Amino acid sequence: MHGDQRATVVELGGALRSYEVGSRPRLDGYTDDEMASGSRGQVLMPWPNRIAGGTFEFAGTTHQLALSEPPKHNAIHGLVRYCNWEVATVDAERVTLAYTLYPQPGYPFLLGLELTYALGPAGLSVRATATNLGADACPYGAGFHPYLRLDPDHIDSLELCSPASHYYRSDDDMIPIASEPVAGTAFDFRDARPIGATQMDTAFTGLARSADGRATVTLRDPVTGDTVALWCDESYRYLMVFTGDALPDADRRRTGLAVEPMTCAPDAFRNGDGLTILEPGESSSGTWGISAGRAPR
């Protein structure tokens, strides 16, 4: 807790289950007796999004991952979503979790992973670090899957402002084909406007940044003026935005907007777009966060 902020982080998957400001949920999360449906709040390591066919080549060797998205024949969202992380340190305003990802079929590399969730005057921050503990170089990417929300039951009436200048056109299996400008498309939210009926399960890049290097996505309730924003530092060059139309549970569709900071593009293990190569002993870190504002009443 910090002031009127409260966040719940769980050992299962190292996930962010909830974030509230003034007792108002600012994440569309899940309760302690639910699974994290729709990947809510989950940690996406050592890759975010999808790998086509679950297969990739690295250092002259072809690797085959389990197809965790069978209908589309993809490996999706990494290998740690349902693993039990250990609490390394904890106090009222901060918790650090750690997990060792051991070599396994499809990803025969050894990674030490660490997450620090912290509450402060500016909101919630999340710092992720991966360290190559093995003897060989390895491919790596990171992402997170929070669903932002405000008080309305659905996102349609909310205004979205996004810093992205380009989006990825994808095939039927959600694998990117090309990066194209958002200008003149339904995906251009550089100037804030209502989400309306726009459907997105879309990756973006070309993120405009402030002087401190942050890129920020903001949701605003035009009725109350309340806002919730997700920001990310320069290590996160990509965003996935998901309106939830394809969720299996119809009651959870469009109740929150998934804004997913990613260090690499979808299918990066194959296309190399933003992929990090960690040499033995090398670490990679990045920070993102959520802030919420209330209009004067």
Image (cartoon, helix red, strand yellow):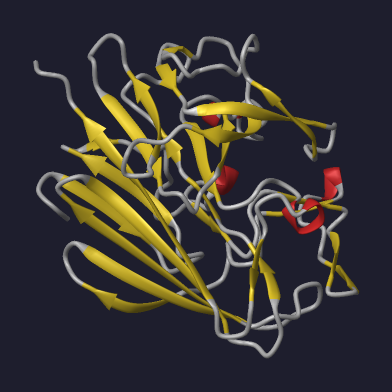
Q: As drawn, which residue projects farthest toward the bottom?
A: 135
**In the depicted view, which residue is nearer to us: 277 or 114?**
277
User: Quadrant of the image for the N terminus?
Assistant: bottom left
Based on the displayed image, in which of its 4 quarters is residue 54 positioned? bottom right
* Residue at point 52%, 10% (across, down): 196
Q: Which quadrant of the rendered structure holds the C terminus? A: top left
Vertical placement of residue 93 versus 145, above or below: below
Counting from the top left corner in percent of width and height, residue 34 is at 48, 51
Query: In the image, residue 69 lies at what x, y percent?
Result: 77, 50
Q: Is residue 94 left or right of residue 263?
A: left
- Residue 22 % position (x, y): 16, 37
> To which quarter of the image does residue 58 belong?
bottom right
Residue visible at 64% across and 9% down? 184
Q: What residue is rendered at 38% in x and 30% in y?
A: 149
Count every numbered label the image shows and give the total: 0
Residue at 37 percent across and 24 percent down: it is 219
Q: Position of residue 60 (x, y in %)?
A: 90, 74
